[in-house]
Amino acid sequence: MAAQFGRRLYKGAATTAAAALAVAALSASQAPGVTADGHGRTAAADAQPSPEATTSGDGGATGNSPYYTDLPPLNSPSPAPTAGTPVAQGSSEAGIPATVLDAYKKAEASLREAKPGCNLPWQLLAAIGKVESGQARGGRVDANGTTLSPILGPQLDGNGFALIQDTDNGLYDGNSSYDQAVGPMQFIPSTWAWAGRDGNGDGVKDPNNVYDAALAAGHYLCRNGWDLSLQSDLHSAILSYNHSQDYLNTVLSWLEYYRKGTHEIPDGTGTVPSGRSDGHAGPSPTPPSTTPPGTGSPSPTPPKSDEPSTPPSQPPTPTDTVDHLADAGTAKLTAMAGDTFAKKISTKAETKAGKAVGKVRVRFTITGDTDATFTGGERVATVSTDTTGVAVAPALHAGEKTGGFTVRATVVGRSVPGLDYTATVTERAADTLARTSDTALTCTPGGEFADQVEVKATWKGAVADRVAATATLIKSADDATVNDKGPYFKDAAGKTVRTLTGLQTDANGLLKLPKLYADDTTGTFLLRVTTAGGATLTVELTVAAAGTSPSPSTSPSPSTSADPTASASPSA
């Protein structure tokens, strides 16, 4: 949450113990899925995070920065939303500035197409936007959606907050010593580096732009294959944004509120929350180190990478003790296009003495010209090491681009050399081809074959879809050169063609060849179909006058004939 949100209406109640307890109780009671007994006490644990939610990547998209704790009114918003969400009168808290609301809805539409299984509701973005920045400080954005002034959280220097040293040289937050959460959705620079998106199509990924930030937040919430229509996945996604039970309850409260109805209000007229999770009622003091470079105010010198990254008064964290990363038995990484890699990357964090270090965040980043992703469609994944110091990356999924790419493992919050893993995507292949019919393929001279040749391709017994294939009318089983007589295909212009390239099996592994025609030559002829991976099938074609047998001179000898339905193993 920003360090500079302007004048607050908060009168200091959150600084008292009684008010803090009241906020926590109200937050819990308003969270969807939470019930309370007759005395207002929480009576169920439905809002507790699922086990997998407790390992939240990089400390959240925001670095677990402070957030607004204001809760929505107890009464439902009015009026109910309509398809066009017109400007309407209603509860002031239910109003969302026009440009901000448009950004949320555009992000939802984009995710509906990019990741339909995520089921991201725009109201979730609105709930997070309310809690993180008060809807961009009440919609103080320009026509393009960029904030009129920076929205910055406090510097994450370890003094009451997480310790995250500068990762962007002050590019986004103007702080060359420590990172700060930036923009309407409060991304820390290190997270924005991989999660950032261009939501307004201007070619720039700007965390200060509400369209870019909303789309990035949507993708962030939709990673890991989460389905946000499921309560457990919804909770996991929200906790990954800011790992706090109170944060989860607050966001869920606003989500439920906005789902009941909202309306559009002019930009700059929205209400700004007043309570903050760190107890501050007004803007946090801006530390000297947040002065952007070049303004004349010096910034503290960041500690060297081999020095402890915590203040001297604090003991070193596990991350501070990491000296290097080592491979933890990762096997050869190879997969066919469209398949999931059978093996996962395993990386071990170790001290200089080779001792395993647990509870360290390792970031895996896919680099290179590839469309391969981790499970969930992301190119970046962060995993904490276990008690043996090992972090196992999510499964890799091969795209359609063949060739090699690299997955780099790095330690989050620690400057140590990265560890590169090479992965290879091979073309789709088949090891077996078979006809789908055993009907004899016959034709009279100058006529056309009644049946088209259809084959099915498989790989290790499974359907081999989208596999490249070639069909050639060959001279004999021992001579695979193109025959200059006998059956033929026709091209688009009606000309004779005896080799077809660029063929591909369909989603069911099937390939139906075009219609075949015969010239005046009688006899038995061979059609050979081959695929990537070496699968070969030779099909027998017969051309004879009605009521006659093919001429023996043109029939293949017994040693070279092929069973029309036979399939062959891959050639050497």
Image: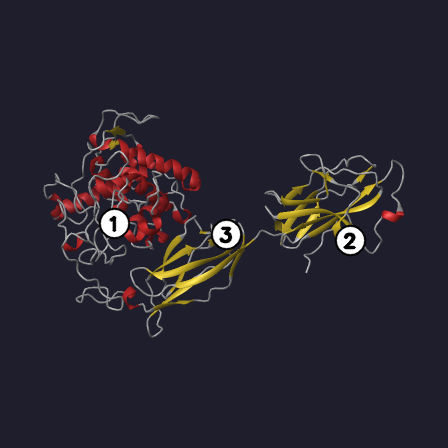
Q: How is the image coloured?
A: secondary structure
Residue at the spot of label 3 = 398
Identify the image quadrant of the C terminus. Answer: bottom right
Element marked by disc 3: loop
Q: Residue furthest bottom?
A: 353
> As drawn, is 474 to the left or to the right of 245?
right
Regarding residue 219, the answer to whether it shows in the image is yes
Element marked by disc 2: loop
Residue 116 horizontal/vertical position (percent): 43, 39
Quarter holding residue 221: top left
> As drawn, is 8 to the left or to the right of 171?
left
Residue at the spot of label 1 = 172
> Nearer the N terminus, badge 1 or badge 2?
1
Residues marked 1 and 2 touching at CB (< 8 Å)? no
Residue 103 horizontal/vertical position (percent): 31, 36
> Nearer the N terminus, badge 1 or badge 3?
1
Task: Give the residue type at disc 3.
Answer: Ala
Residue at the spot of label 2 = 477
Task: Give the residue type at disc 2.
Answer: Ala
Residues marked 3 and 2 touching at CB (< 8 Å)? no
Residue 490 horizontal/vertical position (percent): 71, 37
Separation of residues labelled 3 and 2 (CA atoms): 37 Å
Separation of residues labelled 1 and 3 (CA atoms): 33 Å
> As drawn, is 198 to the left or to the right of 151?
right
> Nearer the N terminus, badge 3 or badge 2?
3
Regarding residue 38, the answer to whether it shows in the image is no
Q: Residues within 10 Å of mark 1 (few under 14, many from 20)?
A: many
